Amino acid sequence: MMRIKILSGMLAGFMMSAAIADTPAAPDTPAAGEPAPGRPAPDRPAPETRIPFANHGGIYNWQVINDRTVLIQGQNRKWYKATLMSSCFDLSFAERLGFESNSDSSFDKFSSIKARGQNCPLISLVETTPPPKKVKANKAAAPAAPAAAAPASPAQ
């Protein structure tokens, strides 16, 4: 008959860590925090950020991407991507937006956007690159259409 002794408390933790330390690691096993060989490193999400003094001119500009994403430009001219908790249906048609800030006057992932009376809470606010600039059509650069030739009179 085999006896099993159950260790408890700190002694058990010490014995387990000593047993694990004595075990050699397999050569094909990657170290903790490193991706497995042949696999790309996982993309890490951008860190959450905040826009300071949002209710005192901290928000300079905004651009709606879709019904769940708004790009916001801070007074420091940095762009931020605000992801909404759910679809905000009036967002694409709104001519003006309200930015509801926190009690410390900052705008972050716990804030919300108001569009046409609809409250749209955020789930994420991260720094991003500026949106692409719109290309203005230059009328002078467009080639002029050739004038239509006058119809030739039929030979008589």
Image: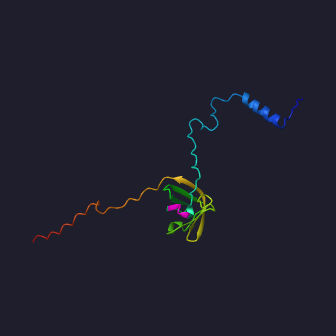
| Residue 65 seen | no
* 132 sits left or right of 114 in the view: left
Label count reads 0
Q: Is residue 128 shown above or below 93? A: above
* 17 sits left or right of 135 in the view: right
* 60 sits left or right of 16 in the view: left
Q: Position of residue 13 (x, y in %)?
A: 79, 35
In the image, what residue occupies the spot 60% across and 67% down? 119
Q: Quadrant of residue 29?
A: top right
The N terminus lies in which quarter of the figure?
top right
Q: Is residue 61 magenta?
A: no
* Residue in the foreground of this view, choosing between 4 and 56: 56
Q: How are the colours assigned in the image? A: rainbow
| Residue 55 seen | yes
* Residue in the foreground of this view, choosing between 49 and 22: 49
In the image, what residue occupies the spot 52% across and 61% down? 59
Q: Is residue 79 shown above or below 99? A: above
Q: Position of residue 122 (x, y in %)?
A: 60, 60
Q: Position of residue 86 (x, y in %)?
A: 60, 62
Q: Position of residue 109 (x, y in %)?
A: 61, 58
Most extreme residue toward the right, as rendered?
A: 1
The C terminus lies in which quarter of the figure?
bottom left
Stretch in magenta: 56-60
In the image, what residue occupies the spot 79% across and 33% down? 14
* Residue in the foreground of this view, choosing between 49 and 146: 49
